[in-house]
């Protein structure tokens, strides 16, 4: 990083104040500043990787220690400007109501609208541009889940919250329904103090996890996590974990929904994060009927598109197999028995076997 400060640049204290004001003007819910010091988090990351808890996410270990050493990832980094942006749409039906209806699809609340990556990157770039206008050229790099960055640890150090027992960043005034982004910079800005851990003796997130992926406070085995299984995992979902997935077809919010601090979650005013194409209330059969062209059209600009049509059908087949054994679900599954993908066929057959077995008179 190379920086140059014009003669009439504001003081570092004034710039610090202005950065916070600009961030809010750009739509960020909160901003904090941290030093690039993550020694303890590095040790946790290395143990997690050594234990294989990252599953097939090989990219988690691809960059060595750079993930926990911002100054190695971006030489010259002196501070990280960490921002958060609330994403939960207003007036959504309660998660429990959807999860209790085996005919409907549950999609993680963050994925109901447009993908956040481009929006937040653009806003962070605008923040960097404002800093440049005020202080002159400076060294920086924008990250929004786009590189080897321990964003939750940086957010914690920047005072945006504490890492809860579900491994998510929790904020006492906003819960956890927010996105994170970072601006690595060489500016020696005043840093914020980390906040107090307020989880106390609560273990609601640990107890609620449908697949027991949270093995202890701040201990996540991604290989069992529904978000990993339905989003990150590219192969067949282990059969013993399929029943616990229920009707969750893209992600899982259970450990957030049950968190007492999310009573303070703030609904977003960002229109791009509001639900599209009725995904907040869609039926499994309706979504399972999408051909690839429809899938690509309906998920344009959405985080869901990264799945691809094959894994979309895989997830929906599992959800249908966990639902009611009615003729409509069975017939929908039969339409995919000859699908070109072996993985899709396997999950469809599993679901059909469950439903046809449950529909037998001696089982009902």
Image (cartoon, rainbow, N blue to C red):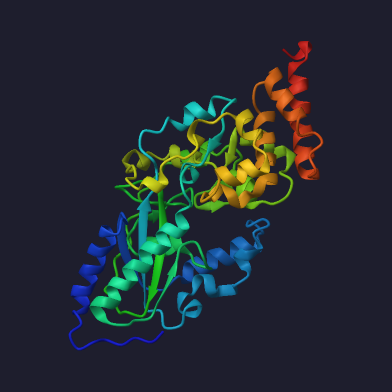
Q: Quadrant of the C terminus?
A: top right
Q: Residue at x 40, y 63 (%)?
A: 122
- Residue 317 is situated, as x and y percent measured from the top left of the image, at 69, 34
Q: Residue at x 71, y 44 (%)?
A: 237
Task: State left or right for residue 223 relative to residue 129.
Answer: right
Front residue of this view, candidates 173 and 38: 173
Q: Residue at x 64, y 25 (%)?
A: 323
Task: State left or right for residue 7 relative to residue 281.
Answer: left
- Residue 224 is situated, as x and y percent measured from the top left of the image, at 63, 46
Q: Is residue 358 visible?
A: yes
Front residue of this view, candidates 176 and 310: 310
Q: Is residue 221 visible?
A: no
In this picture, is 200 found above or below 352? below
Task: State left or right for residue 350 relative to residue 267.
Answer: right
In this picture, is 123 found above or below 267? below
Q: Quadrant of the N terminus?
A: bottom left
In this picture, is 315 found above or below 146? above
Q: Residue at x 63, y 65 (%)?
A: 59
Task: State left or right for residue 285 relative to residue 153.
Answer: right
- Residue 229 is situated, as x and y percent measured from the top left of the image, at 64, 46
Front residue of this view, candidates 332 and 82: 332
Residue 269's quadrant in the figure? top left
In this picture, is 13 found above or below 102? below
């Amino acid at each position: 990083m190379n920086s140059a400060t014009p003669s009439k640049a504001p003081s570092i204290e004034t710039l610090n104040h202005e950065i916070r004001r600009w961030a809010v003007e750009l739509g960020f819910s909160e901003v904090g500043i941290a030093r690039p010091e993550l020694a303890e988090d590095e040790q946790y990351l290395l143990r997690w990787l050594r234990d294989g808890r990252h599953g097939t996410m090989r990219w988690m270990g691809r960059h060595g220690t750079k993930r926990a050493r911002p100054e190695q990832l971006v030489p010259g980094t002196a501070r990280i400007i960490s921002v958060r942006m609330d994403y939960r749409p207003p007036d959504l039906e309660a998660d429990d109501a959807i999860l209790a209806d085996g005919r409907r699809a549950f999609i993680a609340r963050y994925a109901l609208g447009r993908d956040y990556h481009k929006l937040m990157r653009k806003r962070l770039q605008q923040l960097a541009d404002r800093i440049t206008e005020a202080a002159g050229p400076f060294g920086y790099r924008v990250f929004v889940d786009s590189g080897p960055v321990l964003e939750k640890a940086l957010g914690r150090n920047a005072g945006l919250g504490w890492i809860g027992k579900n491994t998510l960043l929790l904020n006492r005034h906003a819960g956890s329904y927010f996105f994170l982004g970072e601006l690595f910079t060489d500016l020696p800005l005043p840093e914020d103090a980390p906040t107090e851990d307020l989880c106390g003796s609560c273990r609601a997130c640990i107890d609620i996890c449908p697949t027991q992926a949270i093995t202890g406070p701040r201990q996540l085995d991604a290989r069992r996590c529904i978000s990993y299984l339905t989003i990150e995992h590219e192969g067949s979902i282990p059969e013993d974990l399929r029943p616990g997935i229920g009707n969750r077809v893209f992600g899982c919010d259970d450990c957030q929904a049950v968190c007492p601090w999310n009573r303070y979650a703030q609904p977003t005013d960002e229109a791009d994060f509001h639900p599209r194409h009725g995904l907040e209330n869609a039926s499994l059969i309706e979504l399972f009927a999408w051909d690839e062209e429809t899938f690509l059209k309906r998920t344009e600009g959405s985080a869901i598109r990264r799945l691809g049509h094959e894994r979309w059908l895989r997830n929906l087949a599992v959800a249908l197999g966990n639902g009611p054994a009615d003729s409509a679900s069975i017939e929908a599954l039969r339409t995919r028995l000859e699908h070109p993908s072996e993985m899709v066929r396997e999950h469809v057959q599993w679901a059909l076997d469950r439903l046809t077995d449950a529909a037998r008179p001696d089982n009902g």
